[in-house]
Image (tube, helix red, strand yellow):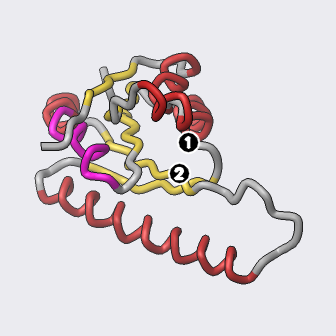
Amino acid sequence: MFKKILVPLDGSTLAEKVLSHVKPLARGFGSEVILFHVLRIPAISASPNATIIEDEELAEQDAQRYLERVENHLEEEGISARPVIVKGKAAESIVDYAELERVDLIAMSTHGRSGLGRWVFGSVAERVLQGAHCPILLIHAREE
């Protein structure tokens, strides 16, 4: 039923909380878990700036190392996983990639912002819910 599960991760422990729910699904269905990270592109870029490019390169290297660590952890547990890094806006990138790859499930944590935080940052989970064309598993992650 779920051959491909897309798991957006932002590097936070809150985002990773969804993995405890994804693991039994992946084992049960023999799913491939796509570990998905979105690098944000600088909003204003009138001319190339070497420090921005270096920061982007460093951010991409950090994201790659992070996803490889999560991938290795899953594979040690017998779960097939692969990392994917894209540049763009989080919600739009998740929805677009899910459609492109024809994923069967998007599984993600919601940080549960409310009030001013939600108004300022918006809700990636909410925008994914509105735009995705496949089932979505949302886990409300809380810090412990």
Looking at the rendered structure, the secondary structure element under dot 1 is helix
Q: Give the image quarter of residue 93.
A: top right
Pick the residue in front: 100 or 21.
21
Mark 2–mark 1 distance (CA, rounded to whole Å): 6 Å
Residue at label 2?
38
- Label 1, residues with CA under 10 Å away: few <14, some 14-19, many ≥20: many
Q: Give the image quarter of residue 40.
A: bottom right
- Label 2, residues with CA under 10 Å away: few <14, some 14-19, many ≥20: many
The residue type indicated by label 1 comes to: Ala
Residue at label 1?
90
**Rendering coords of residue 74 (x, y %):** 20, 53
Checking the image for residue 116, the label placed there is none
**Rendering coords of residue 94 (x, y %):** 53, 37
**Rendering coords of residue 71 (x, y %):** 28, 58
Would you say residue 19 sits in the magenta stretch? yes
Q: Is residue 23 left or right of residue 33?
A: left
Question: Which residue occupies the extreme right position in the image?
Answer: 46
Precedes in sequence: disc 2 or disc 1: 2
Please, is residue 14 above or below residue 133 in the view?
below
Please, is residue 109 above or below residue 42 in the view?
above
Q: Is residue 104 left or right of residue 109?
A: right
Classify the position of the C terminus by image quarter: top left
The residue type indicated by label 2 comes to: Val
Pick the residue in front: 84 or 119.
119
Pick the residue in front: 30 or 122.
122
Which segment is the magenta one? 12-21
**Rendering coords of residue 114 (x, y %):** 40, 26
Would you say residue 78 sits in the magenta stretch? no
Q: Do residues under tags 2 and 1 come within 8 Å of each other at their CB atoms?
A: yes
Question: Which residue occupies the extreme front position in the image?
Answer: 116
